[in-house]
């Protein structure tokens, strides 16, 4: 609807949130292991280590998205993008909650199974290509799957990062609000991921010093 047909803007609107997700996982996972000496000697809330790195990266993604909004606005003369910046901030908050939950869960697992950190790097790369980040969701055919009442595109839309990419593109590329089903989907998965990840991390954190 914005009339923009520049692939670079389309790509960045989906890639910047995904890069934040990927960087938060890879950076946050190593925080406990890398601070092993501190963890074994001093008691403090272990959540501070991974969350501090994730929140630092969130500042970077807000700045990057702000620059993207300014460039797209100048290029397209579409002022609606600036009016939608509060919506973009809400999406960033949801992304931070979702990413934090996944990162906290993997960080706790990585303390015991150190190979998880390397396997995650491979997974993130595969996840990038499997998610409609580099390409639009319309590239995925609506081909029905055997034995299940879903098609390939519906399966792809069950991917939270696919929905995040769609929502950010709605704001920065289409200059419109994300659909209500997409927004509710993101709220649900952000809350679930943060709750599960935080709960698992806290339950395991008392044994981190023993596992070092």
Image (cartoon, rainbow, N blue to C red):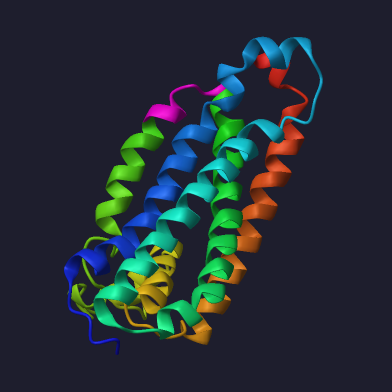
Residue in the image at 43% along x and 41% along y:
23
Q: Horizontally, is 67 left or right of 9 in the view?
A: right
**Residue 146 shows in the view:** no
Q: Residue at x 28, y 47 (%)?
A: 126
Residue 15 location (% of width, % of height)? 32, 57
x 23%, y 87%: residue: 3
Q: Position of residue 20 (x, y in %)?
A: 44, 49
**Residue 196 location in percent, x, y?**
67, 51
Q: Residue furthest right?
A: 43
> Is 153 situated above or below 54?
below
Instruction: Give the image quarter of residue 192.
Output: bottom right
Q: Can residue 9 be seen by looking at this rendering?
A: yes
Left or right for 119, reference 138:
right
Above or below residue 166? Residue 17 is: above
Q: Which residues are magenta?
A: 112-118
Taking the magenta stretch, the answer to whether it contains residue 126 is no
Looking at the image, residue 187 sits to the left or right of residue 128; the answer is right
Question: Which residue is nearer to you in this view: 84 or 204?
Answer: 84
Q: Quadrant of the N terminus?
A: bottom left
Front-most of residues 117 and 49: 49
Q: Quadrant of residue 48?
A: top right
């Amino acid at each position: 609807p914005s009339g923009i047909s520049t692939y670079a803007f389309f790509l960045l609107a989906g890639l910047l949130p995904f890069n934040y997700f990927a960087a938060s996982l890879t950076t946050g996972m190593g925080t406990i292991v890398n601070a092993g000496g501190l963890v074994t000697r001093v008691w403090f809330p272990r959540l501070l280590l991974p969350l501090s790195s994730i929140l630092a990266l969130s500042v970077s993604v807000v700045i990057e998205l702000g620059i993207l909004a300014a460039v797209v606005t100048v290029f397209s003369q579409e002022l609606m993008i600036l009016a939608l910046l509060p919506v973009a901030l809400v999406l960033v908050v949801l992304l931070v909650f979702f990413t934090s939950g996944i990162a906290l869960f993997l960080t706790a697992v990585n303390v015991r199974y150190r190979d998880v950190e390397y396997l995650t790097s491979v997974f993130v790369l595969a996840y990038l290509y499997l998610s409609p980040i580099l390409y639009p969701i319309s590239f995925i055919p609506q081909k029905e799957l055997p034995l299940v009442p879903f098609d390939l595109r519906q399966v792809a839309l069950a991917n939270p990062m696919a929905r995040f990419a769609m929502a950010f593109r709605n704001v920065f590329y289409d200059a419109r609000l994300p659909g209500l089903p997409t927004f509710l989907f993101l709220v649900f998965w952000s809350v679930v991921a943060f709750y599960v990840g935080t709960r698992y991390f806290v339950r395991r954190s008392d044994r981190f010093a023993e596992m070092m």
